[in-house]
């Protein structure tokens, strides 16, 4: 029996409606040199925000400001070592919940350009690669070394299934995925490695997702960093010639959209260098020039954030250049997430090319100067080894490196008995490149080789892996009994103090008058390294989200070199960045 006439009409109408809805797609149009989103020409104006450098309670605030500035996409790194601290042990909770970050971006109407590595950037600890890869001493990173590829594949088989349902084609907001990062700048230049990654990404994400690479706008870098099947993009800043830089991309990709995947809005700071600064006018003009050409642009960074704990990395440009705790980057949004003159200059440029969202830019978040907080010495590090290394020392003829002991971050103490009394000055020496971090004679940190005294090897070492963060997160030393300490002893020591908030928990910045170098924790949260004498960074950013209202906030400082005679910290309502080798009268020379 056939359908009634009305039923036939309804069925036909439904079929026509379904046929009229195009499948979601994000593709390259090589004829018209553009992207196409759902079949229509599309250009993204994006900004980089790294969830690993921003406390989770602030994610919405930062992404909303990016959206209100007129951007339609956010570019995101996924640091492998942030999620797999030990082989096969994964953490996607709390600040590490990358899926929640991606979903929040979608909720706010932002597309995502995802950069899952496996290598991401030298400015993050070990480029995002887990330290445990180095447990195999002869491993060759970022290559077709079988041990490296096995670890990479295992990680991608965990991460990319979380990504796939969030791809644009599947109803999500991820429009493109980057493979590796600036591989053309790496010495290995192994196309088989990129080919392997391409195969893994395709197998786990499917044939439709747009995969791409990013390299410096130099032909030689693009030669080693690109591969057929991965769309080649470039990165450059406002001081580059736009025509020449995109000319380098055209050398590899004669047709397709112009893409600057990292348009530098500022730059990072190195310990001992000046605070980086790039003019808002210059950044805005460069952006206008690229948009005028129809290019797609991602601003790196739009909001830099902070390298909390031990996550700051280093560059090597003729010399080792360690990155500061602050990753402010002189970006359009400051380290604390506040809009700057640069943001409004960028917003004005964008408004000339596409409509801005309706409504005002959210005002700066409130800050509070909690003032002076007195600290007291709790103990010398050597007096609390029972707490910090509860399993006791490892005995070894010669010093063992962090990787042998399977410790990724933080500190280790190496102790030995000298073979004889030292009656006259003697030379303590190490082979070249065997101390690759700061080494203190009473705390030898970062040893890669043996030590000699007057050319005689020192043997019979006791090695203490120090679980400082674990102890502090469990309430030590505030919950512990007071410790008697040898007051005259020099060297690393812990200091403690408390302060209360006046009914509010707002962001703040902490200064270290007279302190030397060390690490700061508040309420168990590792805020990172301080080194005011070296500069340029003079304050650490303290997110209000880690502070408590109605009960004391616990401060713990590990000072490595020497605290001031009357130790205190100063909490301010604004940061101090731009001071290197200059000291106020209260600072220790």
Image: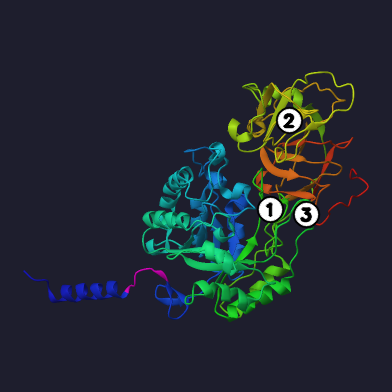
Q: Which mark is residue 276?
A: none
Q: Which mark is residue 451?
A: 2
Q: Position of residue 343 (x, y in %)?
A: 68, 68
Q: Label 1 belongs to which residue?
A: 316
**Disc with the residue nearer the chain's start (3 vs 2):** 2
Secondary structure at badge 2 equals: loop
Secondary structure at badge 3 equals: loop
Task: Give the distance between the C-alpha atoms of the residues marked 3 and 2, in whole angstroms.
Answer: 41 Å
| Category of crowding for the residue at label 3, using alpha-carbon neighbours closer than 10 angstroms: few (below 14), some (14–19), many (at least 20) | some
Q: Position of residue 230 (x, y in %)?
A: 45, 64
Q: Which residues are magenta?
A: 21-27
Side of 546 where 128 appears, left or right: left
Does 254 lie within the magenta span? no
**Disc with the residue nearer the chain's start (1 vs 3):** 1
Which residue is painted at 76% across and 45% down in the image?
Answer: 530
Which residue is painted at 78% across and 21% down in the image?
Answer: 418
Picture quarter containing residue 355? bottom right
């Amino acid at each position: 029996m056939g359908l009634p006439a009305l039923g036939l009409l309804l069925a036909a109408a439904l079929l026509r409606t379904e046929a009229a809805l195009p499948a979601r797609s994000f593709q390259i149009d090589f004829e018209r040199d553009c992207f196409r989103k759902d079949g229509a020409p599309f250009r993204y104006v994006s900004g980089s925000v790294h969830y690993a450098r921003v406390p989770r309670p602030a994610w919405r605030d930062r992404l909303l400001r990016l959206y209100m500035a007129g951007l339609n996409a956010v570019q995101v790194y996924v640091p492998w070592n942030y999620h797999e601290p030990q082989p096969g042990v994964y953490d996607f909770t709390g600040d590490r919940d990358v899926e929640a970050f991606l979903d929040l971006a979608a909720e706010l109407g932002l597309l995502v350009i995802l950069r899952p590595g496996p290598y991401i950037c030298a400015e993050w600890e070990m480029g995002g690669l887990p330290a445990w890869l180095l447990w195999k001493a002869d491993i060759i990173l970022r290559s077709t070394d079988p041990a490296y590829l096995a670890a990479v594949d295992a990680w991608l088989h965990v991460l990319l299934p979380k990504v796939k349902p969030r791809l644009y084609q599947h109803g999500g907001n991820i429009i493109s995925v980057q493979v590796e990062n600036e591989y053309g700048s790496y010495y290995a230049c192994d196309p088989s490695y990129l080919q392997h990654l391409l195969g893994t990404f395709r197998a786990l994400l499917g044939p439709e997702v747009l995969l791409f690479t990013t390299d410096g706008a130099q032909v030689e870098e693009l030669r080693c960093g690109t591969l057929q099947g991965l769309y080649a993009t470039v990165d450059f800043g406002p001081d580059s010639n736009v025509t020449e830089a995109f000319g380098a991309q055209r050398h590899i990709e004669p047709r397709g959209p112009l893409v600057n995947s990292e348009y530098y809005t500022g730059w990072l700071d190195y310990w001992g260098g000046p605070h980086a600064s790039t003019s808002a006018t210059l950044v805005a003009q460069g952006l206008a020039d690229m948009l005028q050409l129809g290019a797609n642009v991602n601003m790196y960074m739009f909001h830099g954030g902070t390298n909390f704990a031990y996550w700051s990395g280093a560059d090597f440009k003729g010399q080792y250049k360690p990155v500061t705790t602050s990753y402010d980057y002189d970006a359009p949004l400051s380290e604390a997430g506040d809009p700057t003159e640069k943001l409004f200059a960028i917003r004005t440029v964008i408004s000339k090319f596409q409509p801005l969202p309706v409504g005002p830019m959210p005002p700066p978040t409130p800050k509070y100067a909690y003032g002076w907080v007195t600290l007291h010495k709790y103990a010398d590090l050597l007096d609390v080894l029972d707490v910090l290394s509860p399993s006791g020392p490892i005995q070894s003829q010669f010093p063992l490196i962090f990787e042998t002991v399977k410790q990724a971050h933080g500190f280790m103490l190496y102790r030995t008995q000298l073979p004889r009394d030292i009656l006259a000055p003697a030379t303590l020496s190490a082979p070249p490149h065997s101390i690759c971090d700061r080494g203190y004679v009473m705390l030898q940190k970062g040893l890669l080789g043996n030590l000699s005294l007057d050319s005689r090897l020192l043997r019979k070492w006791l090695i203490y892996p120090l679980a400082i963060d674990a102890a502090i997160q469990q309430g030590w030393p505030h919950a512990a009994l007071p410790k008697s300490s040898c007051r005259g002893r020099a060297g690393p020591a812990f200091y403690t103090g408390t302060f209360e908030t006046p009914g509010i928990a707002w962001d703040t910045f902490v200064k270290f008058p007279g302190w030397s170098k060390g690490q700061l924790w508040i309420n168990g949260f590792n805020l990172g390294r301080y080194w005011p004498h070296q500069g340029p960074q003079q304050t650490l950013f303290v997110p209000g989200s880690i502070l408590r209202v109605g009960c004391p906030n616990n401060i713990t400082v590990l000072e490595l070199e020497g605290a001031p005679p009357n130790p205190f910290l100063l909490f301010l309502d604004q940061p101090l960045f731009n001071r290197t080798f200059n000291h106020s009268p209260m600072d220790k020379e």
